[in-house]
Image (cartoon, grey):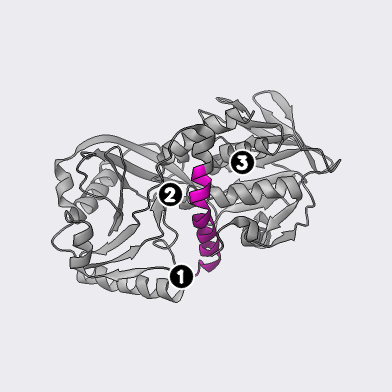
Amino acid sequence: MSASLSTFTSSSSSAGSATSGAASARPRVAIAGGGVIGLALAWRLAQAGCPVEVFEAGETGQGASRAAAGMLAACAEAEPGEEVLLALNRASQVLWPAFAADLEQAAGSSVDLRTEGTLTIALTADDLARLRHLFALQQSLGLPVEWLTAAQVRRREPYLSPKLAGGILTLEDHQVDNRKVAAALKVAALKAGVNINEHTSVSRVETTGGRVTGLVAGDTLHAADVVVLAAGAWSRGIDIAPAAPLPVRPIKGQMLALRMDPAAPILSHVLWAPGAYLVPRHDGRLIIGATTEEKGFDTDLTAGGQLALLTNAWRALPTLEELTILEQWVGFRPGSRDDAPILGPSDEVDGLIYATGHHRNGILLLPVTTQVIADYVLSGRMADVAAPFGAARFAPRAAAE
């Protein structure tokens, strides 16, 4: 895997350069969405000399960016048939250390990138069979994974259930504190000169003759040469005609946080257990997630959802029953039709660029999304690793339907 996205090959896009006009001019960029994707793009583009405005319906970083767990789990979450997405995930995983270091320097605060790795465990014979199947898949994909016996897992995490049957260690699957990332990105963007408009909903992208002229937020037209749609689960609610609406929908996830003793935590690795994942933080929080519910923008916490998470987490880590519940919340993953992101220029509207639909991988894909979209805005070229994720892949099915 390349150590830098700059080594990726690029291909010219049929949409042409987003920087039409004088070669030396930087485009005015308007970004719809103030989550981590929108903020990171704004930061990098402003660093490159672009005038940038961000528009967020609420407060920046308080949607899916706040609700996430911050796992960088490209290997642990590998699934059959997702080899192309895996390549993108792994490319972003490689970029995370340098991205985190740059962000920390720019913002003057830590984002808590932790590198203990991730454990995926089995508790029953059925769990073990599924885990061996996953391990075989990971090996076939050439991923850096290690099989551990129950005793080997317990040496790493002594508080796990005595019913432990085995596990997989993925040393390159790390974690970051997503809330600290969002806060740092806001600071970095402001320092770079980005104009951030909070509590300002975007209703539509304005076009003339098939080209972007700006976006409408509130009742005001904000002129721009380039509009980036990075509104996550809310992307479909923005009128982008004459482009077709994006197939992005909210996928509800319930989560909660418990309080450990930061000086003596009962878990150190990110843990994937049957039915739940657990993510320990330096400050003692233990994040538990997450349900997957097709319920639109339903914000209700349910007894069933919370019970399932706590029960599955308790089966893996019984000691947590003594911990205090700190917080419970709902987030909305931006799911596309194929659960992969939508990246790159619109084929229907010149100057309209997509950076949405990241589903459960928004934090993981943050560096690679930022790099490829910023590169496209500045040069009109898309990195090959992101080329399969254009919105055009949905067009044939949409036409048939």
Q: Residue furthest right?
A: 22
Q: Main secondary structure of the magenta part?
A: helix
Question: Position of 231 compared to 258: left or right?
Answer: right
Give the residue type that dot 2 points to.
Answer: Glu
Q: Which residue is mark 2?
A: 294
Q: Which residue is mark 3?
A: 41
Range drawn in magenta: 80-101
Front-most of residues 33 and 381: 381
C-alpha span from label 1 to label 3: 31 Å
Front-most of residues 160 and 65: 160
Q: x and y percent of residue 354 in the render? A: 65, 47
C-alpha span from label 2 to label 3: 29 Å
Label 2: few (<14), some (14–19) or many (≥20) C-alpha neighbours in 10 Å: few
Q: Are marks 2 and 1 in contact (CB under 8 Å)?
A: no
Q: Earlier in the sequence, mark 2 or mark 3?
A: 3
Q: x and y percent of residue 299 in the render? A: 39, 36
Q: Residue 80 got which mark?
A: 1
Q: x and y percent of residue 332 in the render? A: 45, 43
